[in-house]
Amino acid sequence: MSIPALSSTLTIVRTMDCSCAQRALYLEREGLQPEELRALEVHLEQCSECREAAENAARLRTLLKRPTLRRSAPETLRLRIQRSFHHRRVVSKN
């Protein structure tokens, strides 16, 4: 799958600028074409700012995958929401 915004900013020699690289950091690497991935890797080898951004993006992906982020709402909150929906249905029927 080619990423149009990335493909259009790659030059003939398949280099990548900081703006394009930083957009690519938040995509799944599997979504990049091989030449896009290689251009990103080359850029990260040469650019410490983007390399730091890549490390931050990797940390963010790790944090977002943590099971502790997927908590259920407390029972009292669920009951209040259910009552609110029930009350709205009763009011709208009248």
Image: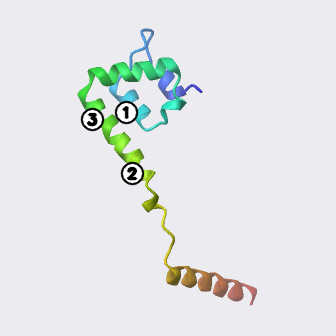
Disc 2 on helix, strand or loop? helix
Q: Residue furthest right?
A: 93
Q: Earlier in the sequence, mark 3 or mark 2?
A: 3
Residue placed furthest toward the bottom: 94
Residue shown at 68%/88% (left/top)?
91
For marks 3 and 1 on the same chain, the one whose residue lies earlier in the sequence: 1
Does residue 9 show up?
A: no
Q: Quadrant of the C terminus?
A: bottom right
Would residue 72 appear left or right of 51 to someone viewing this image? right
The N terminus, quarter of image: top right
Front position among marks 3 and 1? 3
Residue designated by label 1: 22
Q: Is residue 45 left or right of residue 33?
A: left
- At 36% across and 29% down in the image, what residue appears? 19
For the residues labelled 3 and 1, the Cα–Cα distance comes to 10 Å
Residue type indicated by callout 1: Gln
| Residue designated by label 3 | 52
